[in-house]
Amino acid sequence: MTVYAMLADGFEEVEALAVVDVLKRAEIEVYMVSVTGEKLVMGAHQISVCADICFDGADFDKCDMIFLPGGMPGTLNLKNHKGLTEQIRNFDKSGKKLAAICAAPSILGEMGILNGKRAVCFPGFEDSLKGAIIADERAVTDGNIFTSKGMGTAIDLGLEIVKHVAGKEKSEELAGMIQYK
């Protein structure tokens, strides 16, 4: 299992890094991918993060999941990256996994990917989840789509992904190890 965590200037640092951290603890292969053309990406709170690779060097054929952290203007920068939206469409058509948190589920909603699926987002972005069934949970999985509400639910999203990729037992074991819940 390989996950590409997409980073754009203005991404929400905790959402991105908490999910990446949880997945790595579960021994899931994760690469932070910059869509800026530079490895150093500036977060929404002026915290710089060095991505592993740039978008042009990413091999999406070897990737099993695209993860979109939220934040502003990070979400808008991800949404406006034509190469990324093309990959998101390809992943959806082939049933590959897509994960998004906070404002980023709006990208999936505006692309029509959430139609008929249960999803959540940061409060106030629900209108952008076009066709979705809005759930009242911290993190939701529906088929190949994983969504979560925001920074405070980033660990929930990470554990939800681990549960579906590595099993419920691994997710529960990891939650205990990190003193969560």
Image (spheres, rainbow, N blue to C red):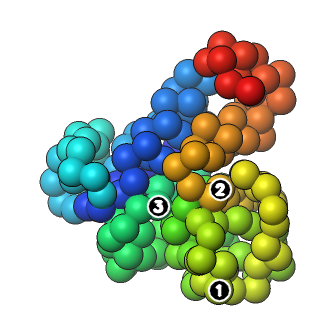
Q: Tag 2 or tag 3, which sits nearer the N-term?
A: 3
Residue 53 shown left or right of residue 14 in the figure = left
Helix, strand or loop at mark 3: loop
* Viewport quadrant of the N terminus: top right
Secondary structure under tag 2 reads: strand
151 left or right of 74? right
Closest to the observer: 46 or 24?
A: 46
The percent position of residue 129, horizontal first and vertical second, equals 66, 80
Disc 1: which residue: 127
Q: Is residue 67 left or right of residue 1?
A: left
Q: Amino acid at mark 2?
A: Ser
In the image, 96 versus 49, the foreground residue is 49
CA gap, disc 1 and disc 3? 16 Å
- For the residues labelled 2 and 1, the Cα–Cα distance comes to 16 Å
Residue at screen point 77% across, 35% down: 163
Which disc is residue 70 wearing? 3
Type of the residue with mark 3 = Gly
| Residue 84 horizontal/vertical position (percent) | 41, 69
In the rendering, at what x and y percent does residue 30 appear? 47, 37
**Around disc 3, counting alpha carbons within 10 Å, would you say few (fewer than 14), some (14 to 19), or many (20 or more)?**
many
**Residue at image point 29% right, 39% down:** 52
Q: Amino acid at mark 1?
A: Asp
- Tag shown at residue 148: 2
Q: Work out whether 132 lies above or below 33.
A: below
Helix, strand or loop at label 1? It is helix
